[in-house]
Image: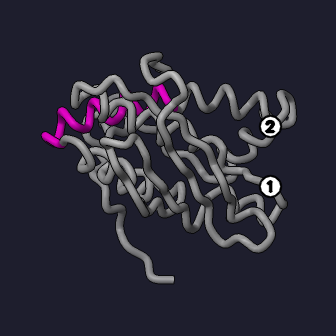
Amino acid sequence: MTKMAPALPIEVDAETGVWTTDALPMLYVPRHFFINNHIAVEEALGADKYAEILYQAGYKSAWHWCEKEAECHGLEGVEVFEHYMKRLSQRGWGLFVTEEIDLDAGTCRVRLEHSAFVYQMGKVGRKIEYMFTGWFAGAMDQILAARGSDLRTVAEQTQSGAEEGCDVGIFVTRPAAFSNSAQG
């Protein structure tokens, strides 16, 4: 394994200890701590209910993040999405690769390699990275709204590296059935 210093800007407030990246507050926690908490909530609520909750929270968070980052860096359109995938990858969730993106059609396909969830949980025979799903629709919808589009999207995980015979996760975003109804 080749090691490198973090590729994203990290600042720590000397008085408060608050970490920031691109002026957004961040938390730095061990992977096992986060995933153990994730598993505990999943066991208490059930995977389907937890996935619903995380979809909405992730959608809202991705919208906010993309809006702030676009402003901070002067980005627009696909540049915002690619920057988001880059930052997610730099923060240790896994490597997010945009395989396809078409803003006019409201579609994208993202491949997830080296998933933090798969590294921690292993081959469990099911899709376990559902926490990320709402992120893709939230990012797409913020970018679309910034372009003046009423099109809104939904995302789903179609494959996980935790499933037998699969090495990577796949997430697909497509137009929502009722494109005029905002989700976040």
Measured from the top left, where is residue 85 in percent x and y?
A: 39, 53
For the point 31% across and 62% down, the residue is: 7
Q: Is residue 60 above or below residue 139?
A: above
Q: Secondary structure at mark 2?
A: helix
**Left or right: 35 as drawn, with respect to 68:** right
Residue type for callout 2:
Ala
Using a 10 Å C-alpha cutoff, classify the residue at mark 2 as few (fewer than 14 neighbours), some (14 to 19) or many (20 or more): some
| Marks 1 and 2, how far apart at CA | 10 Å
Q: Quadrant of residue 159?
A: bottom right
Measured from the top left, where is residue 58 in percent x and y?
A: 53, 32
Measured from the top left, where is residue 72 in percent x and y?
A: 18, 36
Which one is in front, 108 or 81? 108
Please say whether residue 17 is visible from this viewpoint.
no
Which one is in front, 128 or 183? 183
Give the colour scheme of this rendering: one colour
For disc 1, the marked residue is: 126
**Left or right: 39 as drawn, with respect to 71:** right
Residue type for callout 1:
Arg
Q: Residue furthest top?
A: 181
Give the magenta part as a residue range: 59-75
For the point 37% across and 43% down, the residue is: 105
Q: Secondary structure at mark 1?
A: loop
**Magenta stretch prevailing secondary structure:** helix
**Left or right: 15 as drawn, with respect to 75:** right
For disc 2, the marked residue is: 47
Which one is in front, 103 or 114? 103
Pointers 1 and 2 in contact (CB under 8 A)?
yes
Q: Is residue 182 magenta?
A: no
Using a 10 Å C-alpha cutoff, classify the residue at mark 1 as few (fewer than 14 neighbours), some (14 to 19) or many (20 or more): few
